[in-house]
Amino acid sequence: MKVEMQLGSEKLSIETGKVAKQADGAVWVQYGGTVVLVTVVADDAEHDLDFFPLTVDYRERAYATGRIPTVYGRREPRPGTSEQLVARLIDHCIRPLFPKDFKAEVQVLCNVFSSDGIHPADVPALIGTSAALSISDIPFNGPVAAVTVGKVEDRVIINPTYEELHASSIELFVSGKADAVMSVEGGGHEIPEDEVIETIITAHTQIQEIIKLQEGLAAGCSNTKRDYASKSVKSDLSSRVRDLATTRIRESIGMSDKKSREDYLEQVQTEVLSEILEDTPEEVDPNATKDTITILSEIEKEEMREAILTQGKRVDGRGVTDIRPISGEVALLPHTHGSALFSRGQTQALCVTTLGTSGDEDVQRGLDGEVRRSFFLHYNFPPFSTGEVKRMMGPGRREIGHGALAQKALEPVIPDKEDFHYTIRIVSEILESNASSSMATVCGATLALLDAGVPLKRPVAGIGVGLIKEGEQEAILTDMLGTEDFLGDMDFKVAGTSEGVTAIQMDIKIEGVTPELMRRAIHQAREARLSVIEQMNAVIAEPRAELSPYAPRIYSLQIAQQKIKDLIGPRGKTVQGIQEETNTTINIEDDGTVEVAATSAEDVKRAEEKIRAITAMPEIGKEYTGKVVRTAPFGAFVEILPGKDGLVHISQMGDGYVRRAEDVMQVGDEVTVRILTIDDQDRVDLTLVAAGGVPVAELNIGSDDDRGEVGSDWNASRESRDSGGRSNYRDNRDNRDNRDNRDNRDNRDYRDRRSNDSRERRGNRYDQRDNSRDFRNQRSPRIPKGRSR
């Protein structure tokens, strides 16, 4: 069965029954030239767990864009950052829609089989996930749908292309059911709060149409949902636990210290368990311990929510709009480029800024090709931050997701690469956590960037907003705690400047919220954000005037593309030699941009002078001082620039007759010459500058008799060249071609990040150039003006 509709600029089709028929649910989703296969399978056995075992995997196959993986073995590597972010996004959209007591393991697999490189695959993957669950027998309170909304020049675009997203002032991924919004994630260039809400409303209108399409598909499949065992606690046990614990748990409301409150609740749990097991041993009721702990968690949740809704009193004693105490400190790590410690209550982030060169850019490859980022943020969440013992592994989805959100919040205020040539990396180390550590990262990163001297457009701050909703009663919580996050209904993170929103993320645990509630929440977040920015400005309000002495100094210059090979040298020896001699780092781009970096400005200047000397282009009429590198019967060759020489014909060596070049100059002599001509093959003719700075070309070059002798020498050298020169030219050309091929191969090893096409074009230019140099070295001397052959 197949259903279709127009979605944005392309047709969306969902088909089932064609492939993967042994899965509980499988759909083939196509949007433009992008194809995603989504399968869902649930285990038959249910597990006695206190969480829902849902796994979502999203994979982008290399063949989807016509590529072969470049890693060892030529297989797809583990999921990259972008793939893990999409998987996390899908998980957050569908997890609240499974029944609370359904505990069978569910696996969702989204495989991108084809990509047109125009449209992202996250929206088709989420739509396919909802459709596959809806047509399966897995209990699911869907369907759910999503769209991405962009805005280019005040024109709202549904599911914009990659190109449109790059030009868009806002990018929001919005998911929802027919009557409510489920999740929001994205950002923009300081977007006003009301504009964000209007964008979400526009997205939800389109979502409703996609849901109708899925409902039509599910109706055509008519699968019956499977039965599952709904677990309940014995009523007499529940009453007994409530009598013992309710009053004591209520007394924990108002304790401001997280650890003290947790220790107190743990003591209550121990005492209640002791009394319950004394009356009802586990031999009588094997589930007594587990059921008791479940009931205690329910009581804690109920008491917390009731205190907020009826008294406006939160777990730590604050009011619903109060912000925890804030403190900040900068420059606490002396040898880093910029550092800051930001604390909000018992959430603490140590943020460090490092400045690098363009060679330090983060390079990632996705469905839209290779992407280079000169600004990126990494977020670390060690177990000690919550007083736990866990195995230390690589970053998980949570760390990747929190880092991506903080990075998105800061990107709009980072200076353009043309104005600030550095690559910027921020690392956030969470030292203590009691909710909203990603927003603490945004605040700490802003302080660290200013401490490093990065000229931000405006400071950015973030705040987490929560929700408690019971029927018609609801409370929006500013700067929520970890307990409020765990036992509440919404986690709404908003980051931005004083001008508007730069990043937003909303996850909910109920089946949707209305746009009006979101409007109230985002405006409440704005008030808190402005207060936080004011306190951050008291720590550091402007970027430091000088960079850290340990930060690199970067100078950028432009050279001719045909000079790139000269600068690199055989096997990279030339550029490596400059780097070693001047203690610098040099990066060379295909367009001829050269970036020189060092911690010392003097080292940068020395490297720049050497680069300019190597890559300078000879100019007609300009004088140069160089050494004689070779002599011939008809003249001498003088190196006027590194790797570039020109010919001084014997007629240009003095104001009288010169019979041999060796009579005037020897190899190794330092002479001053002026360029007379440069022909179309880049061959340079020089004239010797005589004493007093007068070029020989402007002097009287001798008598008519002298000219006749010079003409004889000229013909002799020409005849000698004609008889044996061609074979020598071919031999020299072959030898030089073999050497150039080795040089080109070595240069490719040195600059392995360059594209193959660019290397081949450049290699061809170098071969032609070197051949013309060989020809120049073997050519007959040019006949001086006024002399006979």
Image (tube, grey):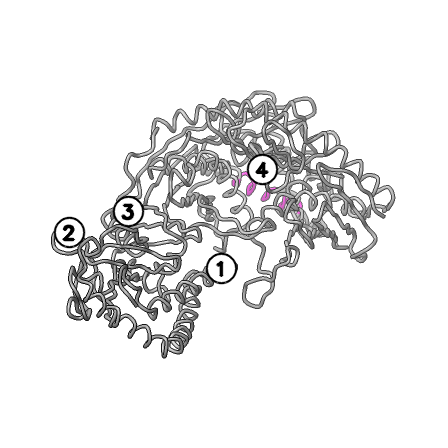
Q: Which residue is mark 4?
A: 486
Reply above or below: 625 against 718. Answer: above
Image location (x, y in percent) of residue 101: 72, 43
Tell me: 151 left or right of 456: right
> CA–CA distance between discs 3 and 2?
47 Å
Q: Which residue is mark 3?
A: 550
- Which residues, given as a range, are shown in magenta? 266-280
Q: Which residue is mark 1?
A: 761
In this orientation, which residue lies closer to the viewer: 650 or 307? Answer: 650
Q: Which residue is mark 2?
A: 693
In the rendered structure, which disc, 4 or 2, sits on the residue that comes first in sequence? 4
* Residue sticking out furthest to the top: 311
Q: Amino acid at mark 4?
A: Phe
> CA–CA distance between discs 4 and 1?
59 Å
Decide: marks 1, 3 in contact (CB < 8 A)?
no
Q: Amino acid at mark 1?
A: Arg
In the rendered structure, which disc, 3 or 4, sits on the residue that comes first in sequence? 4
